[in-house]
């Protein structure tokens, strides 16, 4: 299959090549970390380069089980006269991998790029043994603009509907987007892999039925403040009694696998982070839709909010939820010294909805940019008392410009 370039991520990787620093591509399984890796292999596979590529999702590399196996294989494959690129897919599958990699990461003749699908394993192990000599690049599924290229589609309402329904996993490309059952089976496989390899096996989860119920509950409550207490109350009402500690443990496991992202609340008045009632969003809306089931028409508001969150992260913003007295702002995005406020809505057709989305932003007494993003027909990019409305499709293609 022809490799489709993802230049945004490749350029981020290339900035750190030759800097004696380990490059770690993180993100949920199947979001395209391997695509970025393969593009690097293609571009660097020259006569002057020695590319060592290890894919731990392939049985051919099962013999590399620990750091000793890793070092032995790398030393066997190295060509001393050439610049060496060590590329390892799903590096966390190699026991004590960090002990092996520290033999090579500080050599100017060697570049190391690895991918991983578990934030806790990667960050804790690398921080311990590599003393900060690594950089993480977070990989997401396809943006809407990439989705158009990958699937060779025109930008129209039907294509946006497919993106909303099926999400942005690059592996959908060979499946096509015309057979919902084929797509459902693919998403089932991806979900099972994440569930088993990155959560159940890694965290030694015993109560798998509760874990799956918890993930579904989170998916059904996108954009709502969640706490261990209200989750426990819901589960108890459904004859599923579990402790708050178990709920927090399992929630943390889902975020470490990048399946779900937790977004903390920020007190805009007191300028401090709040420690409870975080909101949760999925890394891919297609997986979220598969897990929750049902019709998109019933929860399109949640999906729009999830897509806006994903794209703000893609644009490089650190995202929190804004809280100011009784007023909530969907997203506060910060990037360096810049701050933006964003409300996400499906349709703004009634005065009460208009007042909620625009009125909440008007209550913020500063001069940072304020935006409302929605799918409201015939409501183009227009300003209302300094607040800019941006159509969802335009935002997903061009950001906030």
Image (tube, helix red, strand yellow):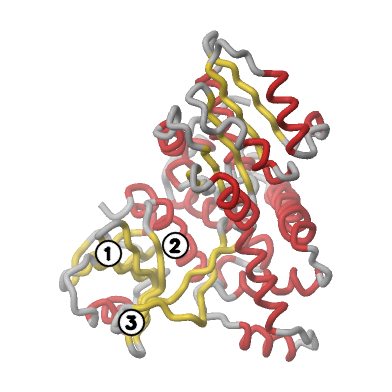
Q: In which quarter of the image is the N terminus?
A: top right
Distance (Cα) linking label 2 and label 1: 15 Å
SS for dot 2: helix
Mark 2: few, some, or many residues within 10 Å (few <14, many ≥20)? many
* Numbered badge on residue 356: 3
Q: Which of marks 1 and 3 is nearer the N terminus?
A: 1
Please state which of the two labelled residues, at mark 2 or mark 3, is closer to the viewer.
Answer: 2
Mark 3 residue element = helix
Which residue is nearer to you in this view: 50 or 210?
Answer: 50
Give the image location of residue 63, x and y in percent.
83, 32
Q: Name the residue under label 2.
A: 309
Q: Residues within 10 Å of mark 3 (few under 14, many from 20)?
A: some
Image depth: mark 2 or mark 1 in front: 1
Q: Distance between the residues labelled 1 and 3?
A: 21 Å
Kindly indicate whether the residue at mark 1 contacts the one at mark 2 (C-beta within 8 angstroms): no
**Residue 286 at what x, y percent from top left?**
60, 56
Instruction: Please report the residue visible at 53 percent of the width from the left and 17 percent of the height from the top.
Output: 83
Residue visible at 49% across and 64% down?
A: 306
Image: 66 above or below 42: below
Element class at badge 1 = strand
Residue in view at x 42 percent, y 38 percent: 12
- In percent of width and height, residue 237 lies at 73, 91
Corner quadrant of residue 221: bottom right
Q: Are the residues at dot 2 and dot 3 in contact (C-beta closer than 8 Å)?
A: no
Q: Nearer the viewer, residue 134 or 99?
A: 99
Mark 2 or 3 closer to N-term? 2
Residue 339 bears which disc, if any? 1
């Amino acid at each position: 299959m022809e490799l489709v370039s993802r230049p945004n991520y490749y350029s981020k990787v290339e900035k750190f090549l030759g800097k004696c620093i380990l490059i770690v591509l993180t993100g949920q399984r199947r979001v395209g970390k391997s695509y970025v890796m393969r593009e690097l292999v293609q571009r660097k596979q020259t006569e002057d380069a020695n590319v060592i590529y290890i894919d731990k999702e392939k049985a051919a590399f099962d013999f590399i089980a620990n750091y000793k196996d890793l070092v032995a294989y790398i030393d066997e494959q190295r060509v001393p006269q050439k610049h060496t690129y060590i590329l390892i897919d799903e590096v966390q599958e190699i026991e004590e991998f960090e002990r092996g990699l520290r033999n090579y990461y500080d050599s100017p003749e060697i570049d190391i790029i690895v991918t991983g699908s578990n934030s806790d394993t990667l960050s804790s192990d690398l921080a311990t043994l590599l003393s900060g000599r690594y950089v993480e690049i977070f990989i997401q599924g396809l943006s809407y603009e990439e989705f158009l290229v990958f699937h060779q589609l025109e930008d129209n309402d039907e294509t946006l509907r497919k993106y909303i329904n099926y999400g942005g996993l690059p592996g959908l490309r060979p499946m096509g987007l015309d057979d919902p059952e084929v797509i459902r089976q693919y998403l089932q496989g991806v979900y099972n892999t994440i569930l088993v390899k990155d959560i159940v096996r890694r965290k030694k989860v015993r109560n798998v039925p509760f874990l799956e119920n918890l993930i579904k509950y989170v998916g059904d409550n996108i954009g709502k403040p969640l706490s261990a207490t209200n989750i426990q109350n819901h589960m108890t009402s459904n004859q599923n009694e579990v402790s708050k500690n178990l709920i927090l443990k399992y929630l943390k496991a889902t975020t470490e696998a990048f399946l779900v992202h937790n977004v903390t609340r920020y007190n805009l008045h007191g300028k401090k982070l709040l420690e409870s009632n975080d909101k949760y969003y999925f890394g891919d809306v297609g997986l979220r839709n598969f897990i929750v089931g049902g019709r998109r028409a019933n929860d399109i508001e949640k999906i729009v909010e999830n897509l806006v969150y994903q794209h703000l992260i893609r644009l490089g913003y650190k995202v929190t939820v804004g809280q100011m007295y009784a007023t909530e702002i969907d997203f506060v995005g910060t990037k360096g010294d810049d701050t933006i406020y964003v409300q996400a809505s499906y349709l703004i057709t009634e005065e009460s909805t208009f007042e909620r989305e625009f009125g909440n932003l008007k209550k913020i007494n500063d001069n940072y940019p304020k935006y409302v993003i929605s799918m409201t027909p015939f409501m183009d990019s227009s300003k209302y008392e300094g607040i800019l409305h941006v159509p969802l499709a335009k935002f997903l293609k061009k950001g906030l410009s």
